[in-house]
Amino acid sequence: MLTSLLNLLPQMLRQIGDSAEARQQAVFAAWTAAVGSQVRKVTLPLRLERKTLIVAVPDHTWRTQLDRIKGQALFRLNSLLGAPIVTNIEFVINPESLSDDRPAPEEFHFVAPEKAAMPLRDDAERISNPELRDAFLRAAGKCLERRAK
């Protein structure tokens, strides 16, 4: 199911228009798929500032290693998004964000995501495809729910 949702990201981004929050959530979802499982375990996208993705890493060593593959990560990320949404990645040392009690990024548990996605409902209404709109709200709701914890 994750692959099919990722295939919808470019279409979703075209249909939602100019919503910074929706764009950020799409970039976060693409990050999870763009990087390998080892990198996924030690990083957490924090925010998208203009076209720079800010990603938490546990220490200086990881930041140095990830800076070396930044170009590859940008290419994969924008390929999944179908547009150059991200032009730079900034890795910040923030081990607190990467605590062991956070859920693994590849696990998706949708628990009442519609409630968490209510702030994005207006953006979602611009998506004409009902399946895409539902997938967008579930993904956005889960991201917002996780951010609220």
Image: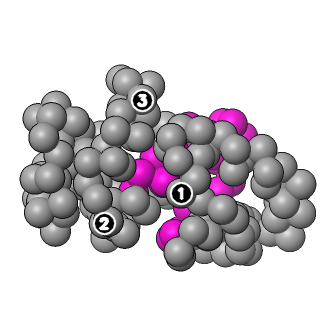
In this figure, which residue is indicated by the disc labeled 1? 85
In this figure, which residue is indicated by the disc labeled 2? 19
Identity, as a three-letter code, of the amino acid under mark 3: Asn
Identity, as a three-letter code, of the amino acid under mark 2: Ser
Tell me if residue 103 can be seen: no
Q: Quadrant of the C terminus?
A: bottom left
The span picked out in magenta is 25-48
Instruction: State the predominant SS element of the stretch in magenta.
Output: helix
**Tag 2 and tag 3, C-beta contact below 8 Å:** no
Residue located at (51% from left, 69% from top): 48
Percent x, y of residue 121: 12, 60
Asked which secondary structure carries label 1, the reply is loop
In this figure, which residue is indicated by the disc labeled 3? 7
Foreground mark, 1 or 3? 1
Q: Is residue 84 above or below residue 57?
A: above
Side of 141 where 29 appears, left or right: right
Percent x, y of residue 64: 89, 63
Q: Quadrant of residue 25?
A: bottom left
Which one is in front, 126 or 114? Answer: 126
